[in-house]
Image: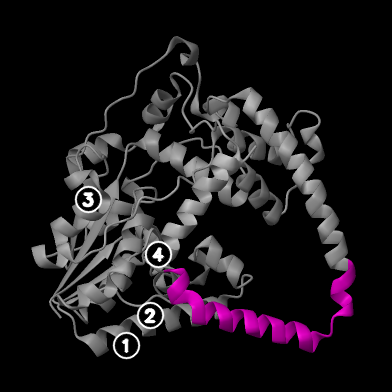
């Protein structure tokens, strides 16, 4: 095989969009000698990471999925890697593309060398590709994702987004590492997919990639971020303090309400906060000197003149919030959770009465049904229908 290209992120640089497009275009790419190998789940190759860093450094979702069972994590990783290797052996492509933003941190755990050794055994050339974005933009996007998936705000005392991971890739002598600036004004075509495919695939292979469709915006509003953060910190004002500790389903319920409630504020920094994040990032000089990438310094503001990074301990300290919408979101969350709690109590009362054999059969049927219908559910037509339904719900929601 001629080459393996490994896309390693950075997180929050359009990674999911690129992976979706490569996954959807798998068949078309194969006709041009390019393979995006099968994944054990989802659209990316994150599951193989523990083979090179050990189970203790596995992604938190993998740890949660296997309930911290290291043996199960390693077995899953080996199965995922076997799937990749078998796919390569079957199709014998000229080029293989692997992708996971989880690979970005391999260097921190000395996993890069092991990873490259495995890849070099299969290919003449190995190229790692990373995209990095301005620290203030990355921080805000990452904050939104952390709250969305964990409900918790994670304050920082110092910021080092790039050097600790990338320097290990750059020091490799048996592989090439290319780092690009993630800025839509500088990306080819203003798009991560077009930029990546133009740079790393032949013109005919790049033209075979199915570009991302326009999808309904599912980002979380600043008000939802603030509400979840206030609940987690125990600082939610009355009557929203009744929400207290939320289950995952209750968090998802609040996010569903947020998507439907009009007037959402996209997360934006308070004046001067982006400058604080930028100035607190310790490796920007290294990025400029080593990678020849420079990020513009955001504007300062008198109101944030004396603020320090370690004082930014809540969403309210960082983002502009529409207080009226915050209250509307909280009110609807209280009503919705009250109804959900009633359903949970009914389900909890009924569940013990159902024979285990029936439950197992129901779960088996559900899993089989999902496996059979997966190609339909993941088709372009189904995605367009879902997006139209989401937009319609948003317009009709009162």
- In the rendered structure, the answer to whether residue 134 lies left or right of residue 190 reads right
- SS at circle 4: helix
Mark 3 and mark 4 residues within 8 Å of each other at the beta carbon: no
- In the rendered structure, the answer to whether residue 216 lies left or right of residue 245 reads left
Mark 3 is surrounded, within 10 Å at the Cα level, by few (under 14), some (14 to 19) or many (20 or more) other residues, namely some
Residue matched to label 1: 86
User: Rounded to the nearest whole Å, what is the CA distance between mark 3 and mark 4?
Assistant: 35 Å
Comes first in the chain, label 3 or label 2:
2
Main SS category, magenta section:
helix
Judge by depth and name the residue closer to the eye, 245 or 322: 322
Residue 355 falls within the magenta-colored stretch: yes
Residue matched to label 3: 179
Locate residue 299, reporting x and y percent: 35, 18
Comes first in the chain, label 3 or label 4:
3
* Magenta segment: 349-378
- Residue at (22% x, 34% y) in the render: 294
Dot in front, 3 or 4:
4
Comes first in the chain, label 2 or label 1:
2
- SS at circle 3: strand
Comes first in the chain, label 1 or label 3:
1
Rendered position, 290 above or below 248: above
Q: Quadrant of the N terminus?
A: bottom left
Dot in front, 4 or 2:
4
Residue matched to label 4: 381
């Amino acid at each position: 095989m001629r080459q393996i290209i490994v896309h390693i992120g950075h997180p929050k640089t359009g990674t999911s969009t690129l992976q979706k497009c490569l996954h959807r275009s798998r068949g078309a790419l194969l006709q041009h000698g390019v393979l995006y190998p099968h994944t054990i789940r989802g659209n990316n190759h994150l599951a193989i990471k523990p083979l090179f860093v050990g189970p203790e450094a596995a992604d938190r979702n993998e740890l949660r999925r296997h309930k911290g069972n290291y043996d199960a994590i390693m077995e899953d990783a080996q199965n995922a890697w076997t799937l990749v290797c078998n796919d390569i052996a079957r199709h014998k492509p000229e080029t293989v593309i692997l992708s996971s933003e989880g690979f970005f941190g391999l260097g921190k755990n000395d996993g890069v060398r092991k990873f490259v050794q495995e890849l070099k055994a299969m290919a003449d050339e190995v190229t790692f590709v990373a995209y990095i974005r301005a620290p203030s933009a990355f921080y805000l996007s990452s904050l939104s994702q952390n709250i969305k998936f964990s409900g918790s705000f994670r304050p920082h005392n110092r910021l080092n987004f790039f050097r600790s991971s990338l320097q290990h890739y750059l020091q490799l002598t048996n592989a090439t590492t290319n780092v690009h600036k993630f800025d839509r004004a500088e990306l080819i075509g203003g798009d991560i997919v077009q930029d990546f495919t133009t740079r790393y695939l032949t013109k005919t292979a790049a033209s075979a990639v199915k570009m991302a469709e326009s999808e309904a915006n599912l980002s979380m509003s600043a008000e939802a971020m603030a509400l979840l953060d206030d609940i987690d910190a125990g600082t939610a004002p009355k009557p929203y303090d009744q929400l207290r500790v939320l289950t995952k389903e209750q968090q998802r319920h609040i996010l569903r309400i947020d998507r439907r409630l009009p007037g959402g504020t996209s997360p934006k920094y308070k004046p001067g906060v982006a400058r604080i994040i930028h100035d607190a990032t310790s490796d920007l000089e290294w990025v400029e000197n080593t990678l020849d990438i420079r990020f513009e310094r955001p504007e300062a503001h008198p109101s944030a003149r004396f603020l320090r990074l370690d004082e930014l301990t809540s969403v309210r300290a960082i983002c502009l919030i529409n207080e009226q919408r915050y209250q509307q979101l909280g009110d609807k969350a209280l009503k919705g959770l009250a109804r959900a709690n009633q359903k949970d109590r009914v389900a909890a009362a009924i569940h013990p009465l159902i024979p285990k054999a029936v439950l197992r059969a129901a779960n088996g049927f559900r899993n089989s049904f999902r496996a059979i219908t997966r190609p339909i559910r993941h088709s372009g037509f189904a995605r367009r229908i879902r997006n139209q339904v989401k937009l319609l719900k948003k317009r009709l929601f009162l």
